[in-house]
Amino acid sequence: MTEPIELCERGSDEIVAYACGKCGSVVGSTSMHGDVAREMASRHCGPWLCRVCGVEHDWSHQTICHDCWRKSRAEREAERDEARFAKATHVAAAEYDGPVADGDEGFWQTIGDAVDELEDDGGEVPAYFWACTEDALKLDANGIIESALEDHHEDAGENISGKDECRLQALLDEWCDTVNVTTWNVDYSRAVVVER
């Protein structure tokens, strides 16, 4: 760390910003960054020390090392998951039929598939999984028409009646039903509890 350069307004002793003592880059203003501005300037060109554990790291311009960041992130995610679980409707696994997820990482067609895969891989089966909601492919006739008419004259859309748009929507709906494109999204309002 280098001693930062204090920057004051001309004719005043009030510090308004700090610059790196090594390269001279203005790093932080006291109005935007407050007390952290001095620390940012002193660490600008390294070495970088983790403000949590004190170890030197190579994650430039960060005040926290990779390990502490990962630990902090895991703690925040655990707190978030606990809060989500507390708010969620709890559904017994035997009463739920559908895909499940363990957050944003793993998705399974059934709770049985999830438990089997995790047990077979020697992993720990969590106390609950999240239910999933279906998001089937849908195409919007109005949006398609608007997009197609962008390069046409201003009044081109007046040549397409509401009835024509409804016919197109019916065709699009029928086509979407035949292509079987479905995405399953995590539903954090329903927790599927694993019976132990």
Image (spheres, rainbow, N blue to C red):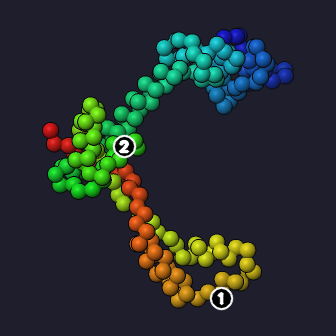
Q: Amino acid at mark 2?
A: Gly
Query: Which residue corresponds to mark 1?
Result: 159
What x and y, as percent, mark residue 72?
44, 26
Rendered view: 188 above or below 35: below
Q: Residues within 10 Å of mark 1 (few under 14, many from 20)?
A: few
| CA gap, disc 2 and disc 1 | 48 Å
What x and y, as percent, mark residue 142?
56, 76
Q: Nearer the viewer, residue 83 or 162?
A: 162
Q: Would you say the residues marked 2 and 1 are in contact, meaning their CB atoms lie under 8 Å apart?
A: no
Q: Amino acid at mark 1?
A: Asn
Q: Nearer the viewer, residue 50 or 87?
A: 50
- Quadrant location, the N terminus: top right
- Quadrant location, the C terminus: top left
Q: Secondary structure at mark 1?
A: helix
* Residue at point 70%, 83% (across, down): 156
What x and y, as percent, mark residue 151?
73, 74
Nearer to us of marks 2 and 1 is 2
Numbered badge on residue 64: none
Numbered badge on residue 106: 2
Rendered view: 179 above or below 79: below
> Total marks drawn?
2
Residue 81 visible to an observer of this rendering: yes
